[in-house]
Amino acid sequence: MSTPFAHVIGDPIAQSKSPLIHGFWLEKLGIAGRYKARHVKPGELGAYLSKHRENGSWIGCNVTMPHKQTILPHLDALDPVAELLGAVNTVVRQENGTLIGFNTDAPGFLEPLQPVLKSQHLFRMARIIGTGGAARAIIAALSDNGFTLVVAGRNPAKARALLDELAGDGEHHAIGIDHFRQPTDFAFDDREGCCDLVINASPLGMAGNPELVFDWSHAPPRSIAYDIVTNPVETPFLKAARAAGHPTINGLSMLIGQAAIAFEKFFGAPPPRDHDAELQELLIK
């Protein structure tokens, strides 16, 4: 049998860091496998999947924009998380050619938060900026972990609809994104024993996009700032958070967490996570 291989597909795709991540792990583990980026335009998606599902060496693909939702009709089955979110970012080919869709956004997002989430808290609140596909996964994941959510978007009605669909019961709030631009003199209550997150789940701050304007007077003391943007890794949002005394999590943490789940599904072995620091350095270069 020829060498097993997987792809990451999208349009555009040249910016993807996934080949570097998977290639790094394959080399560290000495696994005979290949992982490459493939530029697949929207009109080519069906043909790409039809061709590769017949290839016994193709073990699957990761899926980026704009295919995360349009790929659904081409798949044979979805895991429960992908079905809930209505989006797929990992496709795994079974031996009989069946294609199963997964979504690793939620567990990938939660992974760097696990040390915090293991603790008991009196109250958990997250301020989430963005209403796109990543925000869907983040809303569902944090709701499942007992967070009260405030979702900010350009269209508050869309933010409200996401909360109603994905967050279940609770006093969740939808607001306009401009709410966080101006300073506030709000006096936060005692946050000892509480867990607060401020998450940029939007493209704001990404190279080529406008900066995210967030005034850190809106965040309680010790709030964790989490930016899912990976280019640049050190966003103005994170720099401002650090300057205001907040701990930070960058987008590479989520990216690596997502990739780790997909890697094990593709190649049948957990990646060597003791090399994460080395991998992050490579990804930043």
Image (spheres, rainbow, N blue to C red):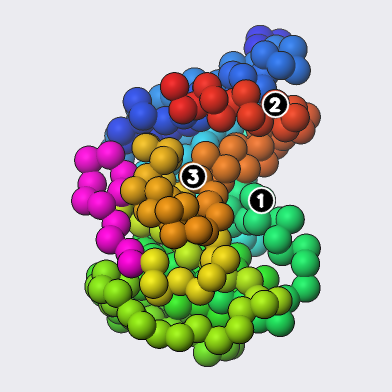
The amino acid type found where label 2 is placed reads: His
**Quarter in which the N terminus is drawn:** top right
Give the image quarter of residue 34.
top right
| Residue 74 in the image: above or below residue 26 | below
Within 10 Å of disc 1 (Cα), the crowding (few <14, some 14-19, many 20+) is some
> Which residue is situated farthest in the top direction here?
2
The amino acid type found where label 1 is placed reads: Glu
Residue receiving disc 3: 251
**Magenta residues, start to end:** 205-215
The residue at the point 45 percent across, 77 percent down is 150
Query: Dot 3: what SS?
Result: helix
Task: Tell me: 154 left or right of 18.
Answer: left
- Residue 48 in sight in this render: no
Within 10 Å of disc 2 (Cα), the crowding (few <14, some 14-19, many 20+) is few
In the picture, the disc for residue 111 is 1
**Quarter in which the C terminus is drawn:** top left
Task: Tell me: 282 left or right of 47.
Answer: right
Q: In this figure, what is the number of numbered marks?
A: 3
Query: Dot 2: what SS?
Result: helix
Q: Position of residue 45 (x, y in %)?
A: 38, 37
Q: Position of residue 93 (x, y in %)?
A: 63, 35
Residue receiving disc 2: 275
278 or 267: nearer the viewer: 278
Mark nearer the N terminus (1 vs 2): 1
Label 3 to label 1: alpha-carbon separation:
12 Å
